[in-house]
Image (cartoon, rainbow, N blue to C red):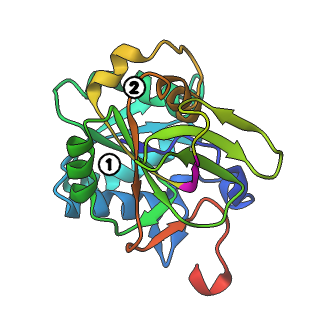
Amino acid sequence: MILAAGLGTRLKPLTDTIPKALVTVHGVTLLEQSLLHLKKSGINQVIINVHHFAGQIIDYLRMNGDFGIDIAISDESGELLDTGGGVKKASWFFNDADPFIVQNVDVISDIDLQKIVDYHIDKKSIATLVVKERETSRYFLFDDKLNLCGWENVKTGERVISGQTGVRLRQLAFSGIQVLDPGIFSFITETGKFSLTGMYLRLSAEHKIAGYVDKDSYWRDAGKKLPENEQ
């Protein structure tokens, strides 16, 4: 699943007239970069949620033959559901027992997706979050076995501990890529608009949510304006 429904406020004024998914980097849209990376990884079925300038995204996909991928649309034009609500609305698409990847459209990465899926299966977790050791204002907190135990915002001082207490926790920054087991839908009690972060923190008190530390791949958050030499 590609999360492409956001308003793209960090990319204004670019997103005043187009959706974030159609912003280009080196002449290629963020959506195309995401789709080609998934396709290269052997993924040929994708669902995309849309809201902001939804029609532009649908027309773009149609004009490009869906890039040779079987693409479904989860239309949130009536209400933007945030990341968690968006995934829940699209749950019908994940109707088998296989784990599935969810990624933000504004993430540019060449990470080996099969390696993450294999790690997820080996860990027997209901969700696996790709994380990196990088500076940011918000971190997921993990124990020494890379089990999710909390979250914190170092700028505001807000801290939520959902797992073990009294253990040394490791700060790791989320990369906007995750693998979920379809069984997770049976544990989702949230309704309407809600975030995956809050849901993960609630579930991690009783269920295993793992971290996958990405050390080697290229990764960039393109949800904010890049320096001119990288555009």
Which amino acid does the dot numbered 1 rest on? Answer: Arg
Classify 116 as above or below 85: below
Q: Residue at x 81, y 52 (%)?
A: 155
Q: Secondary structure at mark 2?
A: loop
Q: Left or right: 71 with respect to 222?
A: left
Give the residue drawn at x 57%, y 64%.
222
Assess whether residue 207 is covered by the magenta stretch: no
Residue 14 x, y percent position in the rendering: 68, 61
Direction front: furthest residue: 166
How far across and how far down the image is residue 217, in percent?
A: 38, 72
Label 1 Cα neighbours within 10 Å, binned few <14 / some 14-19 / many ≥20: few
Disc 1 vs disc 2: which is toward the camera? 2
- Asked if residue 169 lies in the magenta stretch, the reply is yes
Judged left or right of residue 216, residue 229 is right
Secondary structure of residue under mark 1: helix
Q: Where is mark 1, residue-wise?
A: 62
* Disc on res. 200: none
Instruction: Give the residue at x 40% y 30%.
Output: 74
**Pointer 1 or 2: first along the chain:** 1
Q: How many marks?
A: 2
Residue 65: % across, % down:
25, 53
Range covered by the magenta-colored residues: 168-173
Nearer to me, 194 or 37: 194
Disc 2 marks a residue whose amino acid type is His
> Hey, which quadrant is residue 206 in on the image?
top left
From the image, give the main secondary structure of the stretch colored magenta. Answer: strand
Please give the label number shown on residue 207: 2
- Look at the numbered discs 1 and 2 and tell me whether their residues touch, using CB distance below 8 Å: no
Question: Compared with residue 122, is residue 38 higher up or lower down, i.e. above or below?
Answer: below
